[in-house]
Amino acid sequence: MAASILVIDDSKGVRQQILDVLQKTSLFQKYHEAGSVIEAFKIVLKEPVDVILCDLEMPGMDGFKFLNMVSAREDLRDIPVIMITGRTDSETKIRGLEQGASDYVTKPFEPGELVARVKVQLKIKTLQDSLKKSNLELLQLSNTDPLTHLCNRRCLMETLEKELKRAARSNSPLSLIMVDIDHFKKVNDTYGHQQGDVVLVEMSKVLLEHLREYDMAARFGGEEFSLVLPETELLPAVQVAERLRQSAAQMSFAPPLQDLKLTISLGVATFPHGKVRGIDDLIREADEALYQAKRQGRNQVQVMDQIPT
Ligand code: GH3
Ligand code: MG
Ligand code: MG
Ligand code: MG
């Protein structure tokens, strides 16, 4: 990835000197310069910057102000800022470091030292970026079902927790649909486990096709799936479930599954409801409705007991 540096100094001459030194190295592919804090801030908001060199003494807003502005923003906080100062007293340096600077160079600067200090900060920034990227990938991995790439159970629980709190706060409904494939064991027994997996992946695609903007599909486990429908009353949730049931019955598969006829059973539950206080209640109610659907012959949608207690 192309590394970039921003040099902030009110003196054009000083900026040029610094850029001349840095451009002789191959550390950066992009160079930005700014003559004031405002100009600099506009650049960091617009362009990715890896290292910042910032003059402390500037008319109007000074380097300390810039440090404050950068550390107040989470998206900018991790960009290392090297202070440039004409003052050699340790008080200024300490104040800068305490306000979030990563290092400092004193003017007039020694080119070799400037490059060495910039190099250290660029290295730290690069490592930090790759660590952030790995953490994000790990988080995604821990929330994703590896077979269907849907949200997994853990992620479903987190989403439900968040959505239920939101629904309670904003006095809006939240529906949950539990889906279970009918006689899935027979699919495995007839075509083998691997083909069973193919069916699960195809099923997840059908679920995704039925999602509206804020809905979320998850693999609850095995051949069971869940749909979270924020801002959705029981009746519209049942309509979604019914459309899903019909789509599942119309699914067609590639050989060797060409003769397979699949059906699903669905249970729907909605918050708010006298019986539902937390996500465990909501899941239990949807599960009970699903159990009813199974008992009453499968390939159907059932809803939670409507009478609040
Ligand atoms: P019902 O209509 O009552 O739901 O019958 P069923 O056969 O679908 O129900 P049951 O829960 O008894 O069986 C589910 C089967 O799903 C058993 C298990 O082997 C299979 N299964 C669970 N996870 C996976 C998976 O990841 N891949 C495959 N291929 N099969 C799975
Ligand atoms: Mg100055
Ligand atoms: Mg099951
Ligand atoms: Mg089943």
Image (cartoon, rainbow, N blue to C red):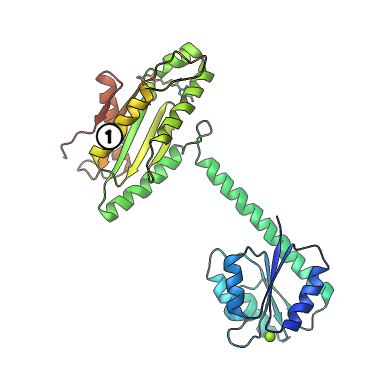
Of the pair 91 and 150, the residue shown nearer to us: 150
> Measured along the vertical axis of the image, is residue 12 above or below residue 153?
below
Q: Position of residue 53 (x, y in %)?
A: 69, 74
> Measured along the vertical axis of the image, is residue 205 above or below residue 76?
above
Disc 1 packing (10 Å; few <14; some 14–19; many ≥20): few
Q: Position of residue 92 (x, y in %)?
A: 66, 84
Please state which amino acid type lies under the numbered disc 1. Gln
Residue at the image point whose x is 57% and y is 49% from the top:
136
Q: Quadrant of the C terminus?
A: top left
**Which quarter of the figure has residue 46?**
bottom right
Residue at the image point whose x is 46% and y is 37% from the top:
152
> Measured along the vertical axis of the image, is residue 235 above or below residue 103?
above
Q: Which of the four quarters of the rendered structure image does ligand 3 lie in?
A: top left
Residue at the image point whose x is 26% and y is 50% from the top:
172
Residue receiving disc 1: 239
Q: Position of residue 200 (x, y in %)?
A: 46, 26
Of the pair 100 and 53, the residue shown nearer to us: 53
**What SS does tag 1 mark?**
helix
Number of marks in the rendered image: 1
Q: Position of residue 26 (x, y in %)?
A: 80, 62
- As drawn, which residue projects farthest toward the top? 190
In this rendering, would 129 be left or right of 157? Answer: right
Is residue 221 visible in the rendered structure shown here?
no
Is residue 32 visible in the rendered structure shown here?
yes
> Measured along the vertical axis of the image, is residue 275 above or below residue 186?
below
In this rendering, would 136 be left or right of 85? Answer: left
Q: Quadrant of the N terminus?
A: bottom right
